[in-house]
Image (spheres, rainbow, N blue to C red):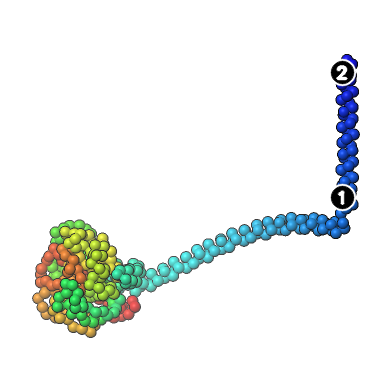
Amino acid sequence: EQTEEAEKKLQKALKDQQEEAEKKLQKQQADCEQKLQAAVTPEQKVLKQTIQELETQLKDLQQCYKAVQKEADAAQQEVQKAKAEVQQVQKAKAEMQQEIVNLKEKLKAPPGFQYLRTATYSCNGVTNIVKEYQHIMTGLEFVLIPEGSFSMGSPPGEYGRRDDEMQHTVKLSSYLISKTEVTQEVWESVMHTKPSDVEGTNFPVNRVSWHDCITFCEQTRLTLPTEAQWEYACRAGTQTAYYFGERSNAKDYAWYDDNSKEIQPVAQKKPNAYGLYDMAGNLGEWCRDEYAKSLQADVLNPVGPSGGNEKVIRGGSWDDLIPCRSAKRNQAAPSFPSKYIGFRVAVTLPSSESDAHK
């Protein structure tokens, strides 16, 4: 018991000493703060007050910035919305303008045709913008070839050249020519016969004589292209031996002995710069003209001689690439049907319609 009593007294004494030490420490801290306050100069007080004021202003500016940023974000959304509306209006305007153009073109379409589109084609470094139409009776698509002049024939030294390819200038009015050779489907719908040896609705019709083709044209109010029209359309502004340029390009544009052993469906290869398919290879094509070894120069819309026993064939066929040159001329009796020969059709526009399409 004496020991416990002594321990309690000791603890109380320690506690009293600790409290006394804390009081002294607090008093010393208070004295130090008073001395520090007394040591601050008036200038420091002003500076401290200025800092406090600036900090308050900074907080106000930050709040203001947040408010302005919020307004700016809202305004930006409105701007984006307005831009989207402007784009929609511009798109609608462009569509309306195109519709007006289409309607005007439909009004200008030649009799028996309807306007389809305006298209752009490129080949061998030449680009053309052309108008395309559909023949209502047959469904065949046609390209409007613009009037112009060109050098018909081939230059001396061209590989495979014959002496009936003398170069001369030809002038042509605008005309329509079919984008493809006449297909078996179209032939059968008009003529109700099946002359071809390799059958398929989208295959070109072959084994038809020149006379057969003329009968088809009479029933559809179409015509065969003249030899000059054919070459002008084939070249489409090019001057090379082949409208597709180098012979190495032939596989992309033509059916010939390296990639075919018979006729193939139309429009499977790339078109020329007028959007015409198979102007080289697949089938040779009957032209309207009588064959003549020499042709007249500087003539408007030449149609060849008035007499003769053979008709012109152009374009070569699937059996050889050399006859596929743009200037290559062949001929055969008009009664001769061949597995190597088909045809495409054309329409020569009257001068008034030609002027309307300029």
Where does residue 114 sit, x and y in percent of width and height?
32, 68
Mark 2 touches mark 1? (CB < 8 Å)? no
**Circle 2 SS class:** helix
Q: Is residue 339 above or below residue 304?
A: above
Q: Which is more toward the observer, 71 or 31?
A: 31
Can residue 347 be spotted in the picture? no
Q: Residue at x 53, y 62 (%)?
A: 84
Where does residue 141 sit, x and y in percent of width and height?
28, 66
Q: Residue at x 90, y 23 (%)?
A: 9
Residue 258: give its label: none
> As shown in the figure, which amino acid type bears the numbered disc 2?
Glu
Q: Which residue is mark 1?
A: 36
Q: Is residue 99 left or right of residue 22?
A: left
Where does residue 201 sit, x and y in percent of width and height?
21, 58
Q: Which residue is mark 2?
A: 4
Q: Quadrant of residue 333?
A: bottom left
> As shown in the figure, which amino acid type bears the numbered disc 1?
Leu
Can residue 70 be spotted in the picture? yes
Q: Residue at x 33, y 68 (%)?
A: 121
Q: Quadrant of residue 290?
A: bottom left
